[in-house]
Image: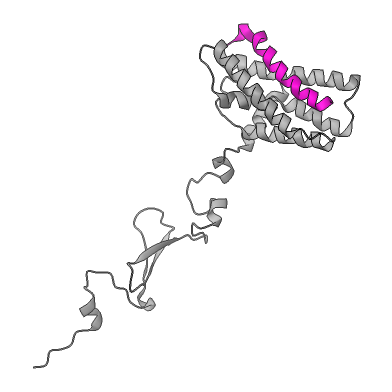
Amino acid sequence: MEQQQKPVHSVLFDSSEPYYGSPENLQFYNTSYGDPSITYSAQANPYYPTTHYPTYHNGSTGGFWSAFGTGGFDEEPPLLEELGINFGHIKSKSLAVLNPLKTVDKNIMDDTDLAGPLLFCLIFGISLLLTGKVHFGYIYGVALLGWVSIYVILNLMSESGVDGYRIASVLGYCLLPLVLLSCVGVVLPLSGPIGLISSTLAISWCTYSSSTMFVTVLQMSEQRILVAYPVGLLYVCFALMSIF
């Protein structure tokens, strides 16, 4: 008796194994876990196991463009926030510097934000460049030397100590009055008594704001003059760049 020939697919493939058939037999199904908005599609391949690729309803497939947005990913922070650039923090700290009479929050140095100081140094250098002074190297050189000096002084004077990131953040944000002075110098000349008076006010403003933050956070109210003296010398160097 002639044996009945079995179908090809039943001979080659067991029913318990996945079937790699033609594209007409592909099925789409929703997972029972994870994001219900994600649909997985099985791709048929006669040589390799079945591969599942997530497809989002908004068209995002987790590729190149997903790095510049947050579409399709739950609770994904913005790209600028992942890079440490938070415009809300920059605004709040800048307003704290511009209003030195306001009471300083003790937690103002908890956020080690360096995006604002780098931005202010860049604006300071560009404003000096517009007046014919190429001082980018001097700006970052003086800033580095001053940061190391203030770091050593404050850690020797305070009991709790402070890390270098917070010191750099405070010194950079408190440079804002001198940055504004350099921007004014693009329009109006700062030579003569006008420049001397305005630079003196800007130095005092920067010194008062930075020393207030350091003294409040490190609880060194009795040593404020000792803190303000080296900080003031640092801002004098930046003021000399603006005038001369």
**Quarter occupied by residue 124:** top right
Measured as percent of width and height from the top left, residue 221 is found at: 61, 9
**Quarter occupied by residue 24:** bottom left
Task: From the viewer's perspective, tell me whether residue 136 is left or right of residue 20.
Answer: right
Q: Quadrant of the N terminus?
A: bottom left
Query: Would you say residue 229 sits in the magenta stretch?
Result: yes
Q: How many marks?
A: 0
Measured as percent of width and height from the top left, residue 151 is found at: 59, 19
Residue 103 makes an appearance in the image:
no
Measured as percent of width and height from the top left, residue 149 is found at: 62, 19
Residue 127 makes an appearance in the image:
yes
Residue nearest the viewer, comparing 210 with 16: 210
Residue nearest the viewer, comparing 236 with 10: 236
| Residue at the image position 35 percent from the left and 76 percent from the top | 25
The residue lying furthest to the left in this view is: 1
| Residue at the image position 61 percent from the left and 17 percent from the top | 214
Residue stretch rendered in magenta on the structure: 220-244
Query: Would you say residue 42 sits in the magenta stretch?
Result: no
Q: Quadrant of the C terminus?
A: top right
Q: Is residue 162 above or below residue 65?
A: above
Task: From the viewer's perspective, tell me whether residue 213 is left or right of residue 73.
Answer: right
| Residue at the image position 87 percent from the left and 22 percent from the top | 195
Task: From the viewer's perspective, tell me whether residue 97 is left or right of residue 127.
Answer: left
